[in-house]
Image (cartoon, rainbow, N blue to C red):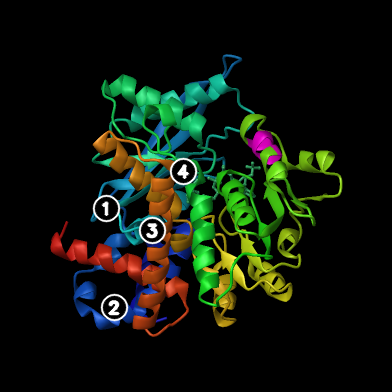
Amino acid sequence: MSAYIEEIMATVKAKNPSEPEFHQAVEEIAESLTSVIDRHPEYRAAKILERMIEPERVIMFRVPWMNDQGEVHVNRGFRIEMNSAIGPYKGGLRFHPSVNLGILKFLAFEQVFKNSLTTLPMGGGKGGSDFDPKGKSDNEVMRFCQSFMSELFRHIGPNTDVPAGDIGVGGREIGYLFGQYKRLRNEFTGVLTGKGLDWGGSLIRPEATGYGSVYFAAEMLATRKETFEGKTCLVSGSGNVAQYTTEKINELGGKVVTVSDSSGYIYDEEGISSEKLAFIMELKNVRRSRIKEYVDKYTKAVYTPVDSSADSNALWNHKADCAFPSATQNEINLKDAQNLLNNGVYLVCEGANMPTELDGVKLFLDKRILFGPAKAANAGGVAVSGLEMTQNSMRLPWTREEVDERLQKIMKSIHKTSVEVAEQYDTPGNYVDGANIGGFLKVAHAMMDQGLV
Ligand code: NDP
């Protein structure tokens, strides 16, 4: 690490105490940028990196709501408006009890680089609440979403800040949030993405992150003249990203043998066929139940509950070729990374945001496996959100084929940029450097053009 980057990291830690995920995200980017800053002293003089680390605006607010029993609850709401150099703030909302300022700042920071890589004009933001939708009735979720939007609406807009979904925020929540925004503003605009198809949503948006991640992995495999045909894959999570990752891997001839939720994981040696995936989708999206029930129906599969005292996650300790962490941050530690390599995994594609701890990433890079970092690999979701914004502005919907084709083009372009930039900066094959530097350069140029703001 250069003295300059060390200085930046010391400042980040001092100014943002108790935000370890934010420190981790900044450190990963800052390390990649050492050679860029050496080649571009003007960026250092203009303190581009220092400015990118500081959110343009942070909004924190009270979200009071009432449960079905008439009891009052108070949650905390957030929106981090990180960087608007290349477009309106854009990024998801996360509803999960673990949500705090540091987690949302890490997500917003990563979003800036990811959105830049998509080639679409979108700045970076992120938001959410420590509200837990699990176990809540539809009415409780609706009352919460209405209260959340009653404050958020004054900070967002189709040309200002366009939120979307993330963990705990799917079609149901986006619907309630949109309804309340429309009521308060008295206008029908594309202020949120991930909307229902009947009211401004885009085809392929629900599938986009998972499909995009598999398209990116297919590009990585193609550099070794390989395809998904016959590949065994480990997938974590069983939510939006995990479901469509599994669907696309199946379509391309691969076999998925694991999925999980926060209580445990299932291992199905025969593979999760499309029929089994339909069961998971109904289980998770309609009945909102636990993945454990999979083994009641498919009795050859094995369920393993989470062991919080273990030093590694057993899901990552099965023979496979590829791994798709698609649940949450820091779900692969150094031991898990080692287990993956020992089991023959040579492609890791990050569907989730920052699922691999820094020393795990270093190990993958040292071993020169195909490692697709989140910023590049899971950018398909926000890319199709960008396409949803375009369709809303034109007031014209595109067909499924048209959106899917554009998504594939974007994922190919992100792959190409990552490969080419890594070569230009003397780290060939390193998708982490390629994506970080590629994403940074566009935002840095824009910030230089726009002066000291
Ligand atoms: P969902 O809420 O649909 O699913 C999340 C899945 O991960 C669930 O199976 C959930 O289990 C599991 N999970 C959540 N938190 C934890 C935890 N702390 N430990 C173990 N498992 C956990 O979210 P998404 O699929 O949308 O998001 C998954 C990841 O992908 C996140 O990192 C998100 O930021 C990222 N992402 C999502 C995009 C999108 O378009 N949706 C775009 C880009 C990135 P349980 O049901 O028990 O909570």
Does the CB distance between marks 3 and 2 fall below 8 Å? Answer: no
Give the farthest residue toward the top: 70
Residue for badge 3: 410
Task: Pick the quarter of the image with the N terminus.
Answer: bottom left
Tell me if mark 1 has few (under 14), some (14-19) or many (20+) residues whose alpha carbon lies within 10 angstroms of its own: some
Q: Amino acid at mark 4?
A: Ile
- Asked if one can make out residue 71 in the rendered structure from this viewpoint, the answer is yes
Relative depth, front residue between 180 and 14: 180
Work out how far the residue at label 3 is from the one at label 4, CA to CA, in angstroms: 14 Å
In this rendering, does residue 16 appear at all?
A: no
Residue 58 at x, y = what percent? 33, 45
- Looking at the image, is 34 positioned above or below residue 206? below
Q: Marks 2/4: CA distance? A: 38 Å
Mark in front: 3 vs 2:
3
Q: Is residue 228 left or right of residue 377?
A: right
Residue drawn at (72%, 63%) of the image: 312
Q: Which mark is residue 37?
A: 2
SS for dot 2? helix
Q: Is 232 situated above or below 304?
A: below
- Marking on residue 204: 4
Residue 128, image quadrant: top left
Precedes in sequence: disc 1 or disc 2: 2
Instruction: Judge: label 1 CB < 8 Å from ligand 1.
Output: no
Question: What secondary structure is the magenta-colored segment mainly?
Answer: helix
State which tag comes first along the sequence, 3 or 2: 2
Magenta stretch bounds: 279-284
Q: Amino acid at mark 2?
A: Ile
Q: Earlier in the sequence, mark 2 or mark 4?
A: 2
Disc 3 versus disc 2: distance between alpha carbons?
27 Å
